[in-house]
Image (cartoon, grey):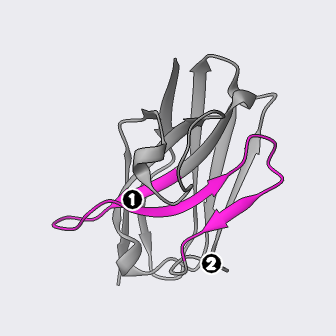
Amino acid sequence: QVQVVESGGGLVQTGGSLRLSCAASGRTFSNYAMGWFRQAPGKEREFVAAISWSGASTYYADSVKGRFTISRDNRENTVYLQMNSLKPEDTAVYYCAARRLDSSGSYYRGLSYNYWGQGTQVSVSS
């Protein structure tokens, strides 16, 4: 299995930027697609972004498209989420997740991911 640990969360003002990192260890990192999800207080977990094992394909929720960018460095076993033009509604705990190549289901669904991190808090003040 693979272990993932998120970092980079914090408090930022509206319009600011943050970059989240997700460091993976264990199995070969390039055997996994990676995703970011978030959960705000009182709300269900929602998809944010995902990236294929090679980095050639990326997927975004409509709410973050054009503001967030997902990327990965397979040499460093790390996936990143660059978040720009942050809004108060982006406030949530952000989770990194790994999805085996043989997993089925949509990249947009949390159930298709096999391993999850503990999350990192992102707070955007108005």
Marks 1/2: CA–CA distance: 15 Å
Residue assigned mark 2: 65
Q: Is residue 95 left or right of residue 51?
A: left
Residue 74 horizontal/vertical position (percent):
78, 32
Sequence-wise first label, 1 or 2: 1
Tell me if residue 42 comes above or below residue 7 in the rendering: below
* Residue drawn at 51 percent across, 64 percent down: 48
Tell me if residue 34 comes above or below residue 39 in the rendering: above
Task: Tell me where the magenta segment starts and ends, as one range.
Answer: 36-61
Q: Is residue 120 left or right of residue 99?
A: left
Residue assigned mark 1: 38
SS for dot 2: loop
Residue 14 horizontal/vertical position (percent):
45, 81
* Residue farthest to the left, as pictured: 42
* Residue drawn at 19 percent across, 64 percent down: 41
Amino acid type indicated by mark 1: Arg
Q: Quadrant of residue 92?
A: bottom left
Of residue 104 and residue 69, the one placed in the foreground of this image is 104
* Residue drawn at 46 percent across, 62 percent down: 47
Q: Say few, some or many: other residues with alpha carbon within 10 Å of mark 1 (under 14 / 14 to 19 / 20 or more).
A: many
Q: Which mark is drawn over residue 124?
A: none
Amino acid type indicated by mark 2: Lys
